[in-house]
Image (cartoon, helix red, strand yellow):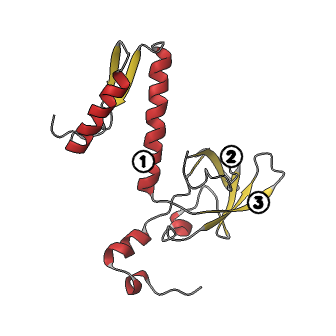
Amino acid sequence: GCYPRADERWSDAEAARLRQTAHLGLRFDADHRGPGLLVRDVITDGPADKADVSIEPGDIVLRIDGHEVDPAMDLTEVLNERRDRDIELLVQSSDGDEEETLTVRPISYGAARSLLYGQWLEHNRQMVSQLSEAKLGYLHIRAMNQSSFYEFERQLYNAGEGKEGLVSDVRDNGGGST
């Protein structure tokens, strides 16, 4: 279809939001050389982790909105300005026997990072529990601001309840007030 330029229909803020690159909720294997994009994992609760979308690690995305894709291409060419609509994916099953066209509604990279952060936290909690034989709790201090302090306080009580100690993780914390 033919659409007016974003700056003719929307405010500057809305136009900037729409120019962002869409995220499909998939991460691809960087070592795969093609054809297509080999799915390394599907982000839990992301666009591709829905009941009506059957994408699994090992599947290969061959086309995005009708455009052939491969690891060498710049995916922003097919994903920019696409967050406000559904995207069609042609996906080949991991065994190569089946190809299926699936539809996903993408999210922003910020939303994908938040989902991945949640997965990372849960992974770390499980690892600490397993390695300490459930004697230690785990919490991550994401930032040093007021809202992060409240989250830290909430996590402190939840993670520490019934434990002999806590692992306080400050990785990727930008600092600030202490």
Image height check: is 93 above or below 155?
below
Image height check: is 66 above or below 131?
below
The answer to which of marks 1 and 3 sits earlier in the sequence is: 3
Q: Is residue 135 left or right of residue 89?
A: left
**For the point 47% across and 44% down, which residue is it?**
116
Q: Is residue 7 left or right of residue 77?
A: left
Along the viewing direction, whichever of 18 and 75 lies nearer the viewer: 18
Q: Which of the numbered marks, if any, corresponds to residue 114?
A: 1
Please name the amino acid that badge 2 sits on.
Glu
**For the point 60% across and 85% down, which residue is it?**
1
Q: Secondary structure at mark 2?
A: loop
Image height check: is 37 above or below 66?
above
Q: Is residue 63 left or right of residue 73?
A: right
Q: Position of residue 149 (x, y in %)?
A: 23, 37
Q: Is residue 101 left or right of residue 69?
A: right
Tell me the CA gap for discs 1 and 3: 29 Å
Along the viewing direction, whichever of 3 and 121 lies nearer the viewer: 121
The answer to which of marks 2 and 3 sits earlier in the sequence is: 2
Image height check: is 32 above or below 128?
below
**Location of residue 8 by image quarter:** bottom left
Provide the residue designation for mark 3: 100
Q: Position of residue 123 (x, y in %)?
A: 49, 31
Tell me the CA gap for discs 1 and 2: 21 Å
**Location of residue 174 by image quarter:** top left
Query: Mark 3 Cα within 10 Å, few/some/many (few <14, many 20+)?
Result: some
Q: Position of residue 119 (x, y in %)?
A: 49, 38
